[in-house]
Image: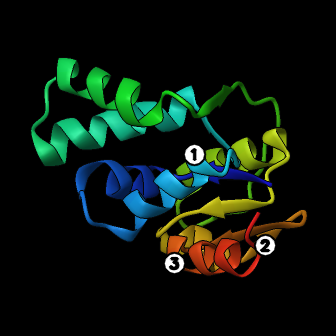
């Protein structure tokens, strides 16, 4: 199974110790489910941590190394224009397409409204948590 992580999932997983996203990220890594992101998604992640959490670059690097070191980084070549209300969200779908992900994990309402693209299901982390717990390895 392969998943693409959106910025808001990564924020939730790394900034709140007891969040479902943290628990889910831990479970994904434990089960060796392939998880993907891009440089652009991590740049957005870093910008949000600076803007909303007032973290410095050293702390952000530490978070990336400690929490996200097992995430597969890819470069995308696909271009999609499916998210009309927030075109910046298309980078997440491009990552999912190029990584051949089965799921996108997100809380983003624009992405969630797409529901599915080229067989890639776009779900909240809570839904994915249920999916992997009904299909244990």
Mark in the foreground, 2 or 3: 3
Q: Residues within 10 Å of mark 3 (few under 14, many from 20)?
A: some
The answer to whether residue 26 is left or right of residue 105 is left
| Closer to the eye: label 2 or 1 | 1
Residue holding disc 1:
29
**Looking at the picture, does residue 51 appear above or below residue 118?**
above
Q: Which percent across, then down, holds residue 36?
A: 65, 40
Task: Kindly state the secondary structure of the residue where label 2 is placed.
Answer: strand
Q: Picture coordinates of residue 96 (x, y %)?
A: 74, 48
Q: Select label 3 or label 1 by which is in front.
A: 1
Give residue 126's mark: 3
Q: Residues within 10 Å of mark 1 (few under 14, many from 20)?
A: some
Dividing the picture into quadrants, the one containing residue 91 is top right
Quadrant location, the N terminus:
bottom right
Q: Quadrant of the C terminus?
A: bottom right
Q: Which mark is residue 104?
A: none
Q: From the viewer's perspective, is residue 14 above or below residue 69? A: below
* CA distance separating discs 2 and 1: 24 Å
Q: Nearer the viewer, residue 103 or 112?
A: 103
Q: Considering depth in this image, is 112 or 103 the residue closer to the camera?
A: 103
Give the mark nearer the N terminus: 2 vs 3: 2
Q: Which numbered circle lies on residue 116? A: 2
Is tag 3's residue or tag 1's residue first in the polypeptide sequence? Answer: 1
């Amino acid at each position: 199974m392969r998943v693409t992580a959106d910025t808001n999932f990564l924020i939730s997983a790394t900034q709140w110790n007891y969040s479902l996203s943290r628990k889910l990220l831990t479970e994904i890594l434990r089960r060796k489910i392939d998880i993907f992101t891009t440089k652009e998604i991590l740049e957005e992640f870093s910008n949000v941590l600076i803007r909303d959490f007032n973290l410095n670059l050293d702390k952000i690097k530490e978070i990336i190394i400690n929490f996200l070191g097992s995430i597969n980084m890819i470069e995308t070549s696909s271009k999609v224009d499916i998210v009309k209300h927030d075109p910046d969200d298309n980078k997440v779908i491009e990552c999912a397409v190029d990584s051949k992900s089965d799921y996108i994990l997100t809380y983003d309402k624009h992405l969630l409204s797409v529901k599915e693209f080229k067989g890639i299901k776009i779900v909240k982390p809570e839904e994915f948590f249920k999916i992997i717990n009904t299909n244990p390895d």
